């Protein structure tokens, strides 16, 4: 099983088990869309999880506030 991605808006799954190529396209599109469209979401609401060959989480990308 190749590396796959899940993309979330808050706690809602937007895309599940997509390929790296699809992830790059959809992630970029979502970043632009939430910035341009008037929705209840912001770029801070978007996150993703990268899964390895065996289904284990390799990377978790969540928005974190800067600590000052």
Image (cartoon, helix red, strand yellow):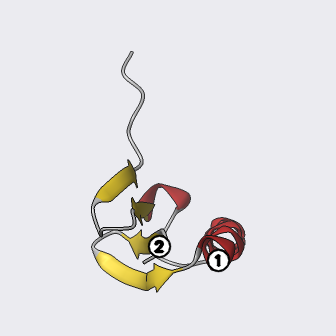
Please name the residue shown 42% across and 74% down the image.
6
Callout 2 environment at 10 Å: few (<14), some (14 to 19), or many (20+)?
many
Please name the residue shown 46% across and 71% down the image.
5
User: Residue 22: x and y, percent?
Assistant: 65, 79
Answer with left or right where residue 56 lies relative to residue 62. left
Q: Secondary structure at mark 2?
A: strand
Q: How many marks?
A: 2
Q: Secondary structure at mark 1?
A: helix
Alpha carbon separation for disc pair 2 and 1 = 13 Å
Q: Quadrant of residue 25?
A: bottom right
Identify which residue, 54 or 26, lies in the foreground: 54
Callout 1 environment at 10 Å: few (<14), some (14 to 19), or many (20+)?
some
Identify which residue, 11 or 56, lies in the foreground: 56
User: Residue 35: x and y, percent?
Assistant: 67, 65
Badges 2 and 1: C-beta atoms under 8 Å apart?
A: no
User: Residue 33: x and y, percent?
Assistant: 68, 75
Image quarter (top left, top right, bottom left or bottom right) of the N terminus: bottom left
Q: Quadrant of residue 37?
A: bottom right
Answer with left or right where residue 36 lies relative to residue 39. right
Residue pointed to by mark 1:
26
Identify which residue, 30 or 5, lies in the foreground: 5
User: Residue 40: x and y, percent?
Assistant: 46, 75
* Mark closest to the chain's N terminus, 2 or 1: 2
Please name the residue shown 39% across and 15% down the image.
68
Residue pointed to by mark 2:
4
* Rendered position, 40 above or below 14: above
Answer with left or right where residue 42 lies relative to residue 56. right
Q: Nearer the viewer, mark 2 or mark 1?
A: 2
Q: Residue furthest top?
A: 68
Please name the residue shown 47% across and 73% down the image.
4
């Amino acid at each position: 099983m190749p590396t796959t991605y899940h993309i979330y808006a808050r706690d809602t799954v937007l895309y599940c088990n997509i390929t790296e190529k699809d992830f790059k396209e959809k992630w970029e599109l979502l970043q632009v869309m939430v910035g341009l469209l008037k929705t209840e979401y912001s770029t801070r609401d978007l996150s993703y999880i990268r899964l390895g060959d065996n289904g284990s989480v390799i990377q978790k990308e969540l928005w974190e506030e800067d600590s000052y």
